[in-house]
Amino acid sequence: MLYITPLETIASGPAPANRDDIGLQKTALRELDHLFAFTLLKEMRKTIPRDTLFNGGYAREMYEEMLYDALSAEIAKTGRLGVAEHVERQLRAAGKLGAQPTGQTVK
């Protein structure tokens, strides 16, 4: 369960069809970082054995997923994971992203 809510794109309204919106590209790349960090945290949790005293059940699973979502959102905001930046560089080299001034990366 990943709670992706790109409020920036909703608040800005629909973009004109003839314009490359760099803001949407940045949001998509940031969400890619978010998804990668979320998946990483969930998979890392699977390696730790569950205790039998506090089994938790469904409520614990929901809490952990919301915790991992919040943590992954903060990790994605920093941009230090580097997945989005790497993908952005590859897409720019392939000519798949709109023009952006040099020296500016996703953050």
Image (tube, rainbow, N blue to C red):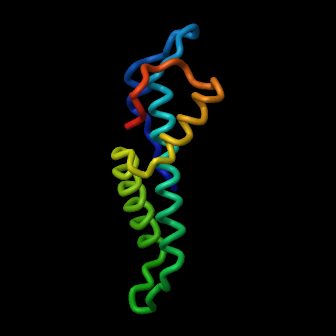
> Horizontal and vertical percent for residue 52?
45, 91
- Disc tally is 0
Q: Is residue 10 above or below residue 49?
A: above
> Horizontal and vertical percent for residue 27?
45, 33
For residue 96, side relative to residue 65 (left or right): right
> Horizontal and vertical percent for residue 43?
54, 68
Q: Is residue 78 above or below residue 16?
A: below
State the quadrant of the C terminus. top left
Residue displayed at 45% across by 40% down? 30
Residue displayed at 39% across by 28% down? 104
Residue farthest right in this picture: 94
Q: Is residue 91 above or below residue 65?
A: above
Residue displayed at 51% across by 50% down? 35
Q: Nearer the viewer, residue 41 or 9?
A: 41
> Horizontal and vertical percent for residue 39?
53, 59
Residue displayed at 39% across by 45% down? 79
Q: Nearer the viewer, residue 23 or 6?
A: 23
